[in-house]
């Protein structure tokens, strides 16, 4: 089912399938969110839970002996959520553990996704409630893809990223076939830089995994227009950048608090880098925001 939020700057649409945002338009009709095209990538802005990326052979074991089985990016992005509440400036979707989910991920949880429209800013909140009797390990992440270029007279190479801080980064190598990561094989990405010019050559291996990033926001900008979109991710340790291998006209700017399993990691879920926990009868909250600075 579709839902909508709008104000004097933006019009947003949502779908209960995956509790995802499906459109971000300004008053001129400019569409900022990638609209999905199977030629490149049919997704738009899926929610990644309870893993980000992949685990080895789609299976792992918790330290208590529970088996978790899930495909890349987890279990919820193709499931129907309920619209629990809506007001003029926000909407809340929710999903409870069911039998099928428990078979793959044996924990009792309620996942709530809230979207708040504040002027030109879209605040996205993830609330993970553990109503079971054991500590629950998990990751959660966002995968919003922005149209790039936005206008017909622009190219992908007319765009660049501006980071909040000057960055010196090496990044690990993703292994496309398995979805895992070689953290020992790293290459230089930024050297005392705040700006990165976009090109498809950047993604010649696959996604760019910024696991050492210090900035907590990044702006996507155009050299030819006033296009500016800022993604802020204070609650997330990692940032992943991606576009499709066949030169998709979008860039995904993805705040994650977990990563695919590394070649150096075991298959114990609790031993993954930056594993998150929510205690029984508690709720963890994570948020990020998309600010459409150039919206009219």
Image: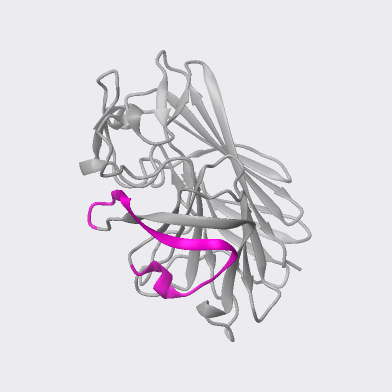
**Is 256 a magenta residue?**
no
Residue 265 is situated, as x and y percent measured from the top left of the image, at 28, 37
* Image quarter of the C terminus: bottom right
Q: Nearer the viewer, residue 79 or 282?
A: 282
Identify the residue at the far top of this view. Answer: 133
- Left or right, 93 with reference to 73: right
Residue 175 against residue 284 in the figure, above or below: below
In the rendered image, residue 202 lying in the magenta stretch gets the answer: yes
Query: Residue drawn at (27%, 58%), measured in percent from left and top?
Result: 176
Q: Nearer the viewer, residue 75 or 240?
A: 240
Image spot of residue 178 (x, y percent): 23, 52
Specify the principal SS of the magenta part. Answer: strand
- Image quadrant where residue 260 sits: top left
Residue 165 location, x and y as percent? 64, 55
Q: Is residue 289 above or below residue 25?
A: above
At x 37%, y 46%, the residue is: 73
Q: Residue furthest bottom?
A: 153
| Residue found at the very far right of the displayed protein | 8
- Name the colouring of the figure: one colour
Residue bounds of the magenta highlight:
177-204
Circle count: 0
Q: Is residue 268 above or below residue 81?
A: above
Which residue is at the front of the view, 82 or 118? 118
* Residue 38 sits in quarter: bottom left
Measured as percent of width and height from the top left, residue 242 is found at 43, 62
From this viewpoint, which residue is outermost toward the left?
57
**Snapshot quadrant of residue 70:** top left
Residue at left offset 71%, top offset 41%: 87
Residue in view at x 57 percent, y 74 percent: 159
């Amino acid at each position: 089912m579709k839902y909508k939020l709008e104000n004097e700057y933006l019009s947003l649409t949502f779908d209960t399938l995956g509790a995802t945002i499906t459109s971000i338009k300004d008053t001129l009709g400019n569409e900022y969110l990638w609209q999905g095209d199977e030629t490149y990538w049919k997704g738009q802005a899926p929610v990644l839970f309870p893993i980000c990326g992949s685990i080895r052979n789609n299976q792992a074991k918790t330290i208590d002996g529970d088996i978790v089985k899930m495909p890349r990016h987890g279990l919820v992005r193709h499931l129907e959520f309920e619209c629990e509440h809506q007001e003029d400036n926000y909407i809340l979707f929710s999903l409870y553990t069911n039998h099928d989910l428990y078979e793959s991920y044996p924990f009792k949880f309620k996942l709530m996704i809230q979207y708040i429209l504040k002027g030109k800013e879209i605040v996205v909140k993830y609330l993970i409630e553990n109503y079971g009797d054991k500590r629950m390990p998990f990751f959660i992440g966002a995968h919003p893809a922005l149209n790039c270029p936005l206008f017909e007279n622009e190219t992908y190479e007319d765009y660049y990223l501006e980071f909040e801080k000057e960055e010196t980064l090496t990044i690990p190598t993703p292994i496309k076939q398995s979805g895992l990561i070689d953290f020992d094989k790293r290459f230089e990405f930024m050297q005392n830089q705040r700006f990165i010019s976009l090109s498809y050559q950047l993604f010649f291996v696959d996604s760019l995994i910024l696991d050492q990033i210090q900035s907590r926001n990044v702006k996507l900008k155009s050299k030819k227009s006033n296009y500016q979109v800022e993604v802020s991710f204070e609650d997330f340790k990692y940032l992943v950048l991606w576009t499709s291998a066949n030169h998709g006209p979008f860039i995904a700017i993805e705040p994650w608090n977990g990563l695919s399993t590394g070649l150096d990691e075991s298959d114990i879920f609790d031993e993954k880098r930056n594993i998150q926990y929510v205690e029984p009868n508690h709720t963890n909250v994570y948020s990020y925001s998309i600010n459409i600075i150039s919206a009219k």
